[in-house]
Amino acid sequence: MTSIFTATTLKWKKYKKLGAGSYGTVYLVGEANSLFLGGSFAAVKSAEFEHSKETIKEAEFLKEVVDNPYIVRCFAEDISIEKGKEVYNMLMEYAPGGTLHDLIVAYNVKGSTMPKSHAAVYSYMLLSGLSHVHRRGLVHCDLKPCHILVFPKINGTDLHHLKIADFGLAKHV
Ligand SMILES: Nc1ncnc2c1ncn2[C@@H]1O[C@H](COP(=O)(O)OP(=O)(O)OP(=O)(O)O)[C@@H](O)[C@H]1O
């Protein structure tokens, strides 16, 4: 495995659990090295090293599609020792708005639906990200609202910035 950073240069700690999926648990992490996290928060997907094959693969895929505004950025990998076991950690941007699924549910709870104009812009963001993935010779294979992350609103608008995540089942074509 090629590590972007090593455990000796990274200093971060887990604050709280954000959720769990088939291949790992996601935590909010805080900086202990402001150079690295820019003084803010990040998210980390962690899995016991012996069960981390899929998460490592996801990090590899994310490195292949880096540099697109509509794809979540993985900026480091790290190994930690937790309860005496090696844990693989994939550090990525933290999405404070949760997932697109949460955003849709929030509209439903208010008894409303997403305005068509917002849906049109969100479709543009996702198709643009997806097109980048395909140009890099990959297919996502698991695209759904809970795999789309919601970032803060774009300045001066009521629109969030969306990014495609969860490349665990992606494939080369
Ligand atoms: N970068 C992130 N920022 C904020 N929250 C995140 C981030 N990545 C994941 N999450 C949260 O953690 C939860 C678990 O994510 P994970 O990718 O492990 O599994 P999942 O997508 O829910 O399930 P599966 O991978 O089994 O389909 C997500 O539902 C989401 O709420």
Image: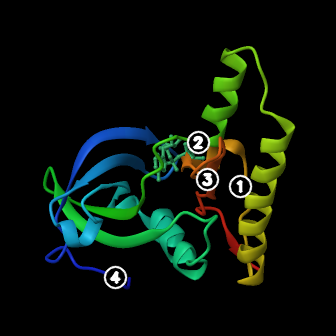
- Picture coordinates of residue 147, whole percent (x, y): 63, 49
Q: Are marks 2 and 1 in contact (CB under 8 Å)?
A: no
User: In the picture, residue 71 is in which quadrant?
Assistant: bottom right
Q: Quarter of the image containing the C terminus?
A: bottom right
Circle 2 residue: 99
> How busy is the neighbourhood of tag 2: few (under 14 within 10 Å), some, or many (20 plus)?
many
Q: Which residue is mark 3?
A: 161
* Structural crowding at the residue carrying mark 1, measured as other residues with C-alpha within 10 Å and reported as few (<14), some (14–19) or many (≥20): some
The crowd level at tag 4 (other Cα within 10 Å; few <14, some 14-19, many 20+) is few
- What is the spatial separation of the Cα atoms under label 1 and label 3, in whole angstroms? 20 Å
Would residue 34 be found to the left or right of residue 51 on screen? left
Q: Within 8 Å of ligand 1, the CB of disc 4? A: no
73 vs 169, nearest the viewer: 73
Query: What amino acid is found at the position of numbered circle 4 in the picture?
Result: Ile
Q: Which residue is mark 1?
A: 142
Q: Residue at x 66, y 45 (%)?
A: 159
How far from the left and from the top, in percent, is residue 58?
53, 67
In the displayed structure, would residue 70 be above or below residue 152? Answer: below
Q: Earlier in the sequence, mark 1 or mark 3?
A: 1
Whole-number angstrom distance, CA of label 2 to CA of label 1: 14 Å
Amino acid type indicated by mark 2:
Thr
Q: SS of the residue at dot 2?
A: loop
How far apart marks 4 and 3 lie (CA) works out to 26 Å
Disc 3 is placed on an element classified as strand
Q: CA distance from mark 4 to mark 2?
A: 27 Å
Q: How many marks?
A: 4
Q: Earlier in the sequence, mark 4 or mark 3?
A: 4
| Amino acid type, callout 3 | His
| Ligand 1 closer than 8 Å to label 1 CB | yes
Q: Where is 151 relative to 104, above or below? A: below
